[in-house]
């Protein structure tokens, strides 16, 4: 009798542990790491996903794409990684969390945000850019970039080794030099020699200095400028990294990161599920949800990619294979 009692208690204990385990598993939130410039957009997508599925979600964790990749490589809990740089998904950044694939779902472009500064050079630069745009004049683009890099004002360019907006800012200056000064390095050298640039870990950290007038211009993504209600100058398509048809032209320009050389390419926002992800089943469901609902991000100035583009060095996960068979995703090459 006593033995039966002990066995019954043991069975109840096992069942109780099982209930706690299942409950914990069900309430584990989806954890998304996102490039800082897109946390608002990703938060909206997460909120919609939660409302439709009931899956719990954690607040978005933002930061520079490359800095986040290094953080993920250290084993932090994460379900989905949203980055604005394809290299962030490489094994050199993610280490053991490397999954071998990423999907581009929207496109963006670089712009030059500016402050309402009393500095007269700011007005001159803005005027030159507007004249250049209206007349398609290389001469006025030269004037604009020459004044921009004169050292008479400060340009925010985030740390290229942490934030892709940083190396893209330098690539814009390279392309401008090539097109308007017949010297790829002209505006880059001018910026450095005149100490015209101010840096931070990511572009988001430079928004407050811009608003307070500590810096007068900031290289930033158009969607981020719109989301943060900043004044900004649209750049020509040959230098804004926003036209996929100019991929070959962009790729001629390079920047040396601490991890190696990066080539210019169109600005795409990617997502992937890292290896050993938290609740990978729901992470894959979120990836599908984002691809199917990317059109809602048009209000942020982003261009949905229809179809989305898969970049992979390994087989796409079975959970996402249907996206290829239905044509919602096409292959774009290796990471």
Image: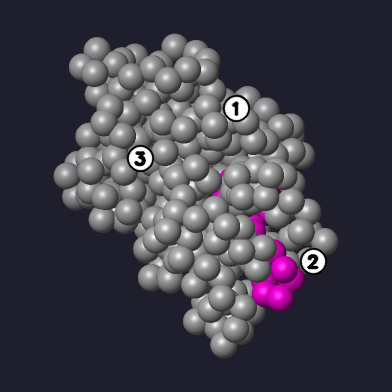
Magenta-highlighted residues: 149-166
What residue is pinned by disc 2? 194
What residue is pinned by disc 3? 106
What residue is pinned by disc 1? 90
Left or right placement of residue 160 versus residue 308 in this view = right
The residue at the point 32 percent across, 54 percent down is: 301
Which x, y percent locates residue 138?
Answer: 54, 53
Q: Residues within 10 Å of mark 2 (few under 14, many from 20)?
A: some
The residue at the point 52 percent across, 68 percent down is: 128
Classified by dominant secondary structure, the portion drawn in magenta counts as loop
Q: Quadrant of residue 273?
A: top left
Q: Is residue 153 magenta?
A: yes
Q: Is residue 78 magenta?
A: no
Q: Residues within 10 Å of mark 1 (few under 14, many from 20)?
A: many
Element under label 3? strand
Which x, y percent locates residue 288?
Answer: 28, 31
Which x, y percent locates residue 76?
Answer: 57, 41
Q: 92 above or below 170?
A: above
Q: Earlier in the sequence, mark 3 or mark 2?
A: 3
Residue 190 visible here: yes
* Viewer-closest of 330 and 70: 330
Disc number placed over residue 323 in the picture, else none = none
Element under label 1? loop
* Viewer-closest of 242 and 91: 242
């Amino acid at each position: 009798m006593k033995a039966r009692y002990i066995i019954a208690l043991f069975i109840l204990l096992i069942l109780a542990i099982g209930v706690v385990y299942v409950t914990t598993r069900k309430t584990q939130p989806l954890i998304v790491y996102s490039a800082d410039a897109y946390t608002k957009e990703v938060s909206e997508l997460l909120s919609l996903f939660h409302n439709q599925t009931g899956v719990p979600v954690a607040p978005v964790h933002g930061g520079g794409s490359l800095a986040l990749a290094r953080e993920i490589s250290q084993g932090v809990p994460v379900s989905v990684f949203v980055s604005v740089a394809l290299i962030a998904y490489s094994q050199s950044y993610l280490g053991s969390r490397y999954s071998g694939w990423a999907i581009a779902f929207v496109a963006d472009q670089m712009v030059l945000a500016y402050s309402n500064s009393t500095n007269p050079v700011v007005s001159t630069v803005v005027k030159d850019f507007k004249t250049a745009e209206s007349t398609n004049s290389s001469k006025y683009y030269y004037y604009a970039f020459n004044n921009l890099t004169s050292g008479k004002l400060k340009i925010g360019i985030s740390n290229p080794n942490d934030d892709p907006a940083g190396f893209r800012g330098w690539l814009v200056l390279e392309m401008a030099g090539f097109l308007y000064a017949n010297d790829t390095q002209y505006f880059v050298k001018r910026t450095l020699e005149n100490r015209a640039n101010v840096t931070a870990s990511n572009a988001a950290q430079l928004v407050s200095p811009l608003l307070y007038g500590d810096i007068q211009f900031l290289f930033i993504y158009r969607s981020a400028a719109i989301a943060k209600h900043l004044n900004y100058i649209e750049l020509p398509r040959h230098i804004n990294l926003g036209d996929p048809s100019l991929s070959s032209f962009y790729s001629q320009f390079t920047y040396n990161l601490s991890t190696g050389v990066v080539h210019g390419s169109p600005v795409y926002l990617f997502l992937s599920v890292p290896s050993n992800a938290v609740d990978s089943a729901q992470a894959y469901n979120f990836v599908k949800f984002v691809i199917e609902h990317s059109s809602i991000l048009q209000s942020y100035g982003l261009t949905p990619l229809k179809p989305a583009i898969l970049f992979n060095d390994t087989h796409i996960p079975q959970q996402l294979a249907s996206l290829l068979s239905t044509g919602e995703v096409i292959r774009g090459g290796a990471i």
